[in-house]
Amino acid sequence: MIEQEPVIEIDEVTVVVNGRHTLGPITVVIRAQEHWALLGPNGAGKTTLLSLAGAERHPTTGTVHVLGQLIGRTDLRELRRSIGSVGHSVADRLPRDSTAREVVLTGRDGTLATWWSEFSEQDQEHAVALLHQLRCDRIVDQQFGRCSQGERQRILLARSLFGRHPLLLLDEPAVGVDLPGRESLINALDDLAGTDAPPATVHVVHTLEELPRSTSHVLMLREGRVVVAGPIDDCLNDETLSACFGIAMHVVRSSGRYSATSASSW
């Protein structure tokens, strides 16, 4: 099997904020078409790592390459146009009076509003089709600001899928989403992974139940350091999850999906 090209290369990186080490030293390589879960307790460094991968910040030491570009030696604004993102940082910048359809359309060029671009009838139809796929068919023309938190997350995922980016970063996309909505989101990620040339994904989650079956790798962080990183079948187990969260955990896999409970409950 031919090894895919790296989309993210983080080499001996540290990040220091206000004199405090929030991440590192850390080394990790994520390759094209891999699907990574990013796990860790609050304060473990997940958000910091995601901001490096999203070309949103510079490392304090070490080097970061994203899509072949060295952070610090490239135009980050242009680089970010090739990265799809789902999370509150994106949602907070989008105009509240844009419709769900308009928000999805902005994913093509990584803009925040549709008046900066022109869209074909095919673009419009594709945007609507993605919203239907993610159970947002009733809110196609509803203002983004009037949508529930769960609806906004699904709209943002449709926006990222519309952009056809080689790298997709998902920052807790299931937060605030009800059970049917979560499953629709997970199914959409599995469908995306099954396409001919899927994007590489980095998916921050708090619970294993949010992970799609297509998750191929896992990276666990604790206090800014790597607990384990690699293929999920090799790296996600009772021992590593317990070390990551500092509590005895039991991992269960059923029909390709993971779940976890504290060891005291079994």
Image (spheres, rainbow, N blue to C red):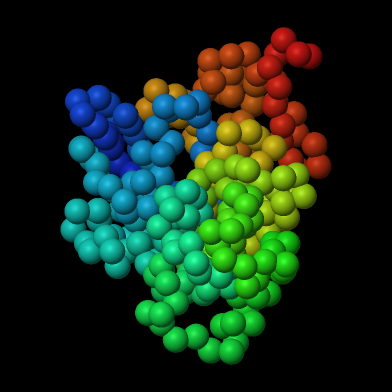
Residue 244 can be seen in this image: yes
Please name the residue shown 47% across and 27% down the image: 42
* Residue shown at 59% from the left, 89% from the top: 121
Foreground of the two, 7 or 97:
97
Q: Residue at x 60, y 87 (%)?
A: 122
| Residue 216 x/y as whole percent | 60, 46
For the view shown, which residue lies furthest in the right direction?
255
Outermost residue on the bottom side: it is 121
Q: Residue furthest top?
A: 264
Residue 83 locus on image (x, y percent): 42, 61
Whether residue 211 is visible, yes or no, is no
The image quadrant where one finds the N terminus is bottom right
Q: Residue 67: horizontal and vertical position, in percent?
A: 36, 60
Height in image: 225 above or below 249?
A: below
Residue at x 39% of width, y 23% of height:
223
Number of callouts: 0
Front residue (pair 134, 93): 93
Instruction: Give the quarter of the figure containing the C terminus.
Output: top right
Q: Nearer the viewer, residue 199 or 121?
A: 121
